[in-house]
Image (tube, rainbow, N blue to C red):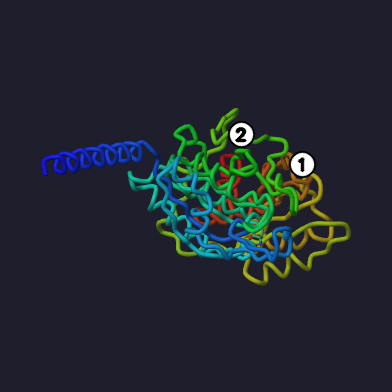
Amino acid sequence: MLFARSAHAALCGVLFLFAAAVQAQTAKLPNVTILATGGTIAGTGATSTTTVGYTAATVGVQSLIAAVPEITKVANVTGEQVFQIASENISDAQWLQLAKRVNLLLAQSSVDGIVITHGTDTLEETAYFLNLVVKSRKPVVVVGSMRPSTALSADGPINLYNAVRLAGTPEAAGRGVLVAMNDQIHAARDVTKANTTTADTFRTTELGMIGYIQGGKPFFYRDVTRNHTVDTEFDLAKLDTLPQVDVAYAYANVGDVAVNALVAAGAKGLVHAGVGNGSLPAKTKPALVAARAKGVIVVRASRVGQGIVARNGEANDDQLDFVVADTLSPQKARILLMLALTKTTSTKEIQRMFYTY
Ligand code: DGL
């Protein structure tokens, strides 16, 4: 009887010590919330070699987490399915929903970082939008994949593991929203999807990515220079909708149909994706001038992909009262103009914003 009691006491002691050790280990791990939105990382294909022609946005967040048990060794992870879509379909309302959820979570001391799983088609746009409206210095990492979860050498699991590691790393704080794909770390402002299907699609071509993730550990080599997150003037708290801003694409022999149609459809802002240094084709320019006269804000961007669109370069922006996009792609210039229009319609103020963010 005495032996049984002492054995029981010893067992209780061991279990207590084990529980204490687990608790201590867990207490040391960062708390990372995964917000899932869909995309290929949550996609499934008919066979293991189906890398195109699969269905995006079919796997739920708990399954994504369960598929990478290694995650639980490096972070205390919780998952939320914010919505489940192919990202070409993301709406302004879903951007606002996601951003407000991020801000609510990061305001909690119990949350150390956030990972957002997302389709890659508009991943760069969501990342830049969040870069302008998240009000925390804590890491926010946007991640996707180029192969569905069912594919041979699916890139989703390792991308997700790396993203969680990055979101749980204090050194990732204060750098704005980050994109972690293919062992690389990119800043939200300048990264773009540069290939339709390959795993190395996310590139920051000339301005450069900011680091690598190797063996699950982030290594940073440069930082961002433009304002972001807590250092922007945009506040979502009072926003339930975003102004309509559209993009008109330039090409050889383009006319004014698209510009006129977008203005007629109610655009409050127009981004012109010009050829070269943001050049205005002669057949398009009058429509843009007329749009400006109606109070539409016109931003000259370029379809080229790299470089600065020079103010008063290919057009007299001072005289036309246009804004130039600096180095922002047309799709990102649209996002900044949307948010700018929630604050002002002064082209002087909006141009300042394009040189600040
Ligand atoms: N439909 C695309 C999307 O959700 C699939 C591409 C991907 O996620 O990689 O963005």
Q: Quadrant of ligand 1?
A: bottom right
Secondary structure of the residue carrying tag 2 is strand
Q: Of all residues shown, which one is farthest toward the top?
A: 221
Could you say where residue 350 lies in the image, as x and y percent from the top left? 58, 48
- Dot 1 alpha-carbon crowd within 10 angstroms: few under 14, some 14 to 19, many 20 or more: few
Secondary structure of the residue carrying tag 1 is loop
- Residue appearing at x 44%, y 34% in the figure: 170
Could you say where residue 56 lies in the image, as x and y percent from the top left? 63, 63
Residue where numbered disc 2 is placed: 212
The kind of residue on which mark 2 rests is Tyr
- Residue appearing at x 52%, y 52% in the figure: 116
| Residue 264: quarter of image | bottom right
Q: In front here: 2 or 273?
A: 2
Looking at the image, residue 177 sits to the left or right of residue 49; the answer is left
Could you say where residue 22 lies in the image, as x and y percent from the top left? 33, 40
Q: Which mark is residue 313?
A: 1
Looking at the image, residue 18 sits to the left or right of residue 46; the answer is left
Mark 2–mark 1 Cα distance, whole angstroms, equals 37 Å
The kind of residue on which mark 1 rests is Gly
Instruction: Name which of mark 2 and mark 1 comes first in the sequence.
Output: 2
Q: In front here: 195 or 317?
A: 195
Looking at the image, residue 168 sits to the left or right of residue 124; the answer is left
Image: 242 above or below 169:
below
